[in-house]
Image (tube, rainbow, N blue to C red):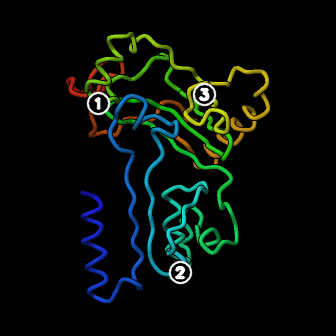
Amino acid sequence: MLDSAVGDVMRALESSGQAENTLVICTTDHGVAFPEMKCNLTNHGTGVMLIVRGPGGFQGGKACDSLVSQIDLFPTICDLLEIRHPDWLEGRSLMPIIREQKDQVNDAIFAEVNYHAAYEPKRRVRTTRWNYIRNYDPRHKPVLPNCDDGPSKTVWLEHGWKDRAVATEELYDLTFDPKERRNVAADPGCAEPLNDMRKRLGDWMRSSNDPLLRGPVPLPADAVINDMNGVSPKDKPGKY
């Protein structure tokens, strides 16, 4: 279905004569909230599709493994159009990578969760080698309403998911553990990268004036959420 829809767009651009003058960006959100997917900060939950085609070097079917966030698209478009970056703009232009001047423009990328169906505060920093996640929920338990109901969730619940502990810190070595199954935060041999990733995350939280530094992130005045101690996003919401 996606291929068909993209084909319609590309054929329309070709027939109108605008194909070589149009930057086409195809990207996604985080997908469905399956177990350990959306609302989680491993690569299963943060990795999204990004395909770009158009002028300025976005041709040729090249694949790129550079660290990229969607906030990098705005400055990339600015550079492609040769217009000034607004002072408030975040992110870094990808044009040095596209022009093969650099392999990376980011030495780290960041992500966060505050609210989905329920409150679940956590932060993440990822480099090419390491992924570090800090969980701020003092219960140290899964926030089950943030996972959609379905067969996978049912199987996990039947096997005790509700009582599985969630670590305060998670550190994954993406070279030897690309599926992020072994948390090495407590491994003495990983103390140096752990401290480095802690510092990177702390610096980012301070530079972005993260509200979590001042305590729990307040619920917006007109919002309702699920109880983080509940099970399903279909449970009755309220002010928790």
Side (left or right) of 181 relative to 130 = left
Side (left or right) of 233 relative to 91 = left
Residue annotated with mark 2: 56
Establish if 202 lies above or below 99. above
User: Is there CB contact under 8 Å for labels 1 and 3?
Assistant: no
User: At numbered mark 1, what does the secondary structure look like: helix, strand or loop?
Assistant: loop
Picture quadrant where residue 236 is located: top left
Q: Residue furthest front?
A: 61
The residue shown at (32%, 17%) is 155
Residue annotated with mark 1: 148
User: At numbered mark 2, what does the secondary structure look like: helix, strand or loop?
Assistant: loop
Question: Depth check: 187 or 83 in front?
Answer: 187
Q: Position of residue 93 (x, y in %)?
A: 58, 68
Establish if 81 lies above or below 145. below
> What's the residue type where badge 3 is placed?
Glu
> What's the residue type where badge 1 is placed?
Asp
Residue annotated with mark 3: 170
Q: Earlier in the sequence, mark 1 or mark 2?
A: 2
The residue shown at (21%, 23%) is 235
